[in-house]
């Protein structure tokens, strides 16, 4: 019980994280240390199993091979759609339905070990027709946390990443309404529905990160909903795929203070949620190409299933009066901030990111066509645009 808190709830303060050591250089296998080790042995004996639990742990080389790819961003940009529909239709892919975030600075290795010991992941598994199974995890918040990318750099330096994006204005509306539903799902009484103008700027004061901030009260009040969350280019720059050595690029990135973790052997597949659209014959043709490119990127031998029109979940009656329509006049200031972030993100993606080594994009022209729209307010008529 001591370790699960650190693995599942890194911000939990009641229990310290598990401690590991690599003292056995011959096997290079992670082992519990101190009282944790004794607790593990005692628990194993009391449950009738006399085998040393450390024997089930993977070496660091095995951990590095455990995962083929990770969906790391961003929330409300189609990551759940990819998980539930695209990547859970074939035995060639194993993607757990839960989110697994490698966020804790002291328990990252344990998070990966638990995928095997508790969550059903297998190393070097194959399908019935002999095709290697590709394991994957999803955590849409990885690029927002302080330690997450550093943990990937240390433990999974050659993994493939998938990052999805969308128009910042639509993203904010979806993220706000999602948090409204989730926060009030099991609560009675006061509804969390702050005025959107109170969510302008960072998610928490005193830190450039959206998760793991020292000001827990600020995080609690905003529920990680803030206009700075739409600065996707700030988070993407942390992959270290672009030079970040000119005033022009640094200005677009706001001279942010988040850590950067170059992984030359890793790749990033960048996409826009509009590439999922199948509302017209042109959309269907582009979507089919997107699936082929995704299949090639992941090295899949089996075809991905065709895309279909995705419907949003219905709003529950108790919160429907608080759901925002981002095009209402009261949200004009917020839209202005989001469009500003969208313009800077589009320019950075176009001028620096999409052509960088290690970055993969399906149909660059279509992707940039979609991202170009980020610099305009979608609530305005097109004839009112400058």
Image (cartoon, rainbow, N blue to C red):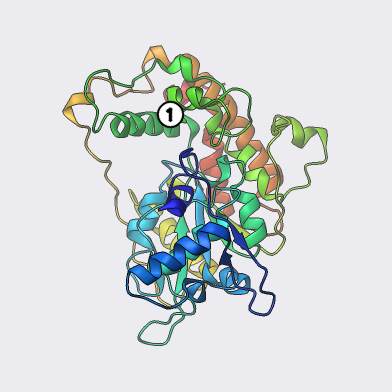
Residue 199 vertical placement versus 181 (above, below): above
Query: From where the camera sits, is residue 365 visible?
Result: yes
Assign the C terminus to one quadrant of the image. Answer: top right
Query: Residue 138 versus residue 113: which sits nearer the camera?
Result: 113
Q: Give the image location of residue 298, x and y in percent.
A: 51, 68
Q: Is mark 1 on a helix, strand or loop?
A: loop
Q: Name the residue under label 1.
A: 223
Q: Which residue is drawn at 52% across and 35% down?
A: 373
Left or right of 176 on screen, residue 383: right
Q: Residue at x 33, y 23 (%)?
A: 325
Query: Residue 131 versus residue 217: which sits nearer the camera?
Result: 217
The crowd level at tag 1 (other Cα within 10 Å; few <14, some 14-19, many 20+) is some
Q: Which residue is drawn at 34% across and 71% down?
A: 90
Q: Residue at x 46, y 40 (%)?
A: 12
Q: Give the image location of residue 97, x and y in percent.
A: 35, 57
Q: Give the image location of residue 207, x and y in percent.
A: 63, 29
Q: Find the residue positioned furthest to the bottom.
A: 129
Query: From where the camera sits, is residue 289 visible?
Result: no
Residue 205 vertical placement versus 229 (above, below): above
Which quadrant holds residue 285?
bottom left
- How many numbered marks appear? 1
């Amino acid at each position: 019980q001591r370790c699960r808190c650190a693995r599942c709830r890194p911000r939990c303060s009641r229990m310290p994280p598990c401690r590991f050591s690599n003292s056995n250089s011959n096997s290079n296998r992670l082992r519990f240390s101190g009282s944790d080790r004794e607790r593990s042995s005692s628990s194993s004996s009391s449950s009738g199993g006399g085998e040393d639990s450390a024997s089930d742990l993977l070496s660091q080389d095995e951990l590095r091979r455990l995962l083929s790819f990770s969906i790391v961003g961003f929330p409300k940009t189609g990551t759940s759609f990819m998980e539930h529909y695209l990547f859970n239709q074939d035995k060639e892919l194993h993607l757990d339905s839960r989110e697994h975030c490698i966020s804790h600075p002291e328990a990252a290795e344990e998070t990966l070990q638990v995928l095997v010991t508790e969550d059903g992941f297998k190393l070097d598994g194959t399908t019935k027709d002999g095709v290697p199974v590709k394991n994957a995890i999803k955590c849409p918040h990885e690029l927002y946390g302080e330690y997450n990318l550093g943990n990937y750099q240390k433990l999974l330096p050659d993994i493939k990443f998938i990052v999805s994006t969308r128009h910042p204005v639509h993203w904010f509306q979806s993220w706000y309404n999602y948090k409204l539903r989730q926060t009030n799902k099991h609560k009675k009484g006061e509804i969390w529905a702050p005025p959107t103008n109170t969510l302008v700027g960072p998610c928490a004061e005193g830190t450039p990160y959206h998760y793991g901030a020292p000001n827990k009260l600020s995080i609690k009040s905003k529920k990680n909903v803030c206009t700075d969350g739409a600065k996707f280019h700030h988070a993407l720059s942390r992959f270290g795929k672009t030079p970040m050595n000119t005033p022009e690029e640094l200005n677009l990135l706001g001279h942010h203070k988040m850590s950067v973790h170059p992984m030359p052997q890793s790749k990033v597949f960048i996409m826009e949620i509009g590439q999922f659209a199948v509302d017209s014959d042109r959309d269907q043709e582009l979507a089919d190409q997107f699936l082929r490119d995704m299949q090639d990127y992941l090295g899949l031998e089996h075809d991905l299933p065709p895309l279909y029109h995705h419907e949003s979940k219905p709003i529950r009656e108790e919160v429907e009066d608080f759901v925002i329509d981002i095009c209402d006049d009261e949200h004009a200031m917020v839209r202005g901030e989001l469009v500003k972030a969208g313009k800077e993100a589009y320019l950075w993606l176009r001028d620096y990111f999409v052509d960088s080594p290690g970055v993969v994009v399906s149909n660059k022209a279509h992707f940039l066509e979609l991202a170009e729209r980020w610099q305009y307010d979608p609530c305005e008529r097109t004839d009112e645009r400058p």
